[in-house]
Amino acid sequence: MNYLVSLCCVCVTGGAVAVPMPDPADYVGKQIVEIDVPDEVTVNQLLADGLDALACRPSPGVGPWVVDDDGLALLESMGLTASPLIEDLAAYQAGRNAERLAIRGTHGATRGLDSFYDDFRTLPELNSRLDQIISDHSDIATGIMIGTSHEGRQIRGVVLNAGGGSKPAVLFNGCQHAREWISPMSTINIADSLADGYGTDSTITALLDKVEIIVIPVVNPDGFEHTYAAGGYRFWRKNRRDNAGSCEGVDLNRNWDADWNGGESTSTDPCSDIYVGPGPMSEPEVTALGDYCLAHGNILAQIDFHSYSQLILEPRGYTTAPPPDWDELHAVGGSISDAIASVHSVNYTHDNPCNILYCASGTLIDWPYDSYGALSFTIELRPASGDPGGFDPPSSEIRPCAEENFAGVLALIEHVSTSMGIELTAGPPTTVSTDVTTSFPVRIFERSEAPDPATARLLYRGDGGSFDEADLLHLGGESYEATLPTFTCSESPEFYVAVDGVSGGMATYPSSAPSELLIATVASDVAVAFDDNAETDPGWTVSGTASDGHWDRGVPAGGGLRGDPPADADGSGQCWLTDNVEGNSDVDGGATVLTSPAMDIPGDGWTLAYWRWYSNTFGGAPNADVLTVEWSEVGSATWQNLETVGPSGPGTSGGWIRADFDLDASGLLGVDVFQIRVTADDADSGSVIEAGIDGVQVSRIECEDTPCLGDLDGSGEVDVDDILQVLGAFGSNDPVADTNGDGIVDVNDILNVVGAYGPC
């Protein structure tokens, strides 16, 4: 494990900058061992005797401790076994120094993402980077100094505000805990990437035009410097308050006035790593950040970055009782998790801290939420829990960690960028008609601003040109209806929904529209070969090895607890669900398999579509399980994969998701009859799996434009020639002139042609 202590300054060969590096001499005689501590009494005895636990909340069980020869003798006298993790810290530290010096010597500390993120940076380097961001992007970037620390160091940051003016704001801060070096690296990258992307990246530009961003990389500058200073301690956690004794420091992330000293992972002992301090908000670093947030008055969301364990913690941190807007918080946490996973396929589990880490009182996850209603989160960065890198991961982890968390940051900013929420409650239409209009429900609701119902509108186009506009029908309250017109087969419909706020704001769906648009396919007919909304059972079968939680068809009964769906997908009422009982216990002891009846494929060009629900983010072993969907030709014993969801990443946090597969492209070209099977597999006994299937359909979109009524000669418009043609056929059964198909050309056909006069 990379658990190191104490630092000195070492000069990079050939460079002009003295780079702080741990001094191997400080580690002579020390090592890191893993101890299996049997009970709380033994934990307290080891701490009282001066052994240093590297867990922030030492508890019974296996964990890393720093020991010297006296510590090893103590362990032996207590009958405890110490398994070496790093036996010679001095030699280990010398090797780590050589690695960092090689990085610095090759790349230096010059401006540019590639070089700056090759190594961990000191406080002066981070502040210099802030200065460079401000200088390079003076049109949108402004430096801030929110206060000073116990030892008089400035707490610095940067504000990004494109165009100036008051905007809803999102705040990102790092390094409340001094030893978590990867935190300020990931945090400052947020400012770097947003500032560099403004004006060059359409998504970032659209977001910064709507939202102000505040980045404070290091909240605890004294503690951070102490991890670098000669005679300091690489794994120092707290600030540097003088407690008038041998134990300095307060845990800043236990000092916030949100259930302060509430007893959840807290201590009143100044020697503890989780010492709460003499009073709530007693520390200058905490009051500086708190006063800044309160004075700002418009911070709607924030993330407090820590390490490590790859988690997204959602309020409240000191209790499992859900806050009033838990649904929104958990949904946003899922969006952040999915965005992170989309970059390097690394999963960050999101949930209440009590469920996936431990409860904690007095933390920054709760103070913004309780004080001014901000959507607040704590992200525990790389590496994963139990990883040997611990608080001291290799420098190679910096860049991927920053990249994936920047994607998560964009997801949060996108959510905040809409002062009013817009939801398409049944999803956007994917098919529109040549013959009839297409209506769909829309929900518009207030976030920071009330919407003006009279301005709710649908903007659409079929030819890539300018948008046409149609008012939404207000059905009362938050409910609206949007209606798309008919389109021709040659058109490519694009559309979005917009609404203005009563205070001058505007929201769109998608949030970055018109840079991002919804699209639909034009159809004159949809041929359906198989259609099952789960209201009846056309012949599905259930099998598998699971001891509990098998697939069952019915109305969702679990109430939305622990990741199960609160309702079906298509609104018909019923769907297929795993363990569909009140107080559901999920799939246990193996796999449950749902196999469809035989489904015909009448030819080529057919599509399989279904709604699926999958959640595996709850329980003691989240993200351990997968959902698989496979197909097989009827009569064959071979099954081919259509999709695998999980064990981590997008689609593992619940929510009905529409899946569509071109059957020809999926390997079924030439297959006449096939089946699918859906398997929810309990791979770990500590996991909670919730799965659902609904609205299974095999269909093919067909498109043939309806002829223009009255255009008898096919010229593209109804004119005098068409009138003359119908007059010439008057009294006959000429099928071309018989516009209404009643078998005779009469006055009604003349009226149809005259009524359609003009361009088609």
Image (tube, rainbow, N blue to C red):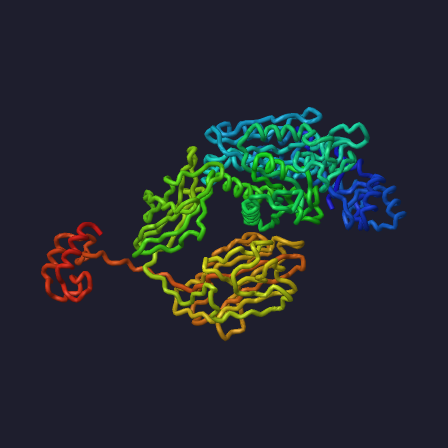
Q: Position of residue 41 (x, y in %)?
A: 83, 46
- Name the residue nearer the viewer: 599 or 422: 422
Q: In the rendered view, does 300 fall on the left or right side of 238?
A: left
Q: Nearer the viewer, residue 418 or 217?
A: 418
**Number of callouts:** 0
User: Given the current orientation, which residue lies at the most extreme front position?
Assistant: 476
Residue at 80 percent across and 42 percent down: it is 66
The x, y position of residue 646, in whole percent, is 58, 56
State whether residue 409 is above or below residue 14: below
Q: Quadrant of residue 432?
A: bottom left
Q: Residue at x 70, y 42 (%)?
A: 391
Q: Residue furthest right?
A: 77
Q: Is residue 92 visible?
A: yes
- Identified at 48% across, 60% down, the residue is 573
Q: Can you give x and y, in whole percent of width and height, for residue 659 in the image?
A: 48, 58
Residue 581 relative to residue 674: left or right: right
- The image shows residue 134, relative to residue 731, as above or below, that is above
Please name the residue shown 79% across and 40% down the image: 52
Q: Residue furthest bottom?
A: 635
Is residue 101 at all visible to an observer of this figure? no
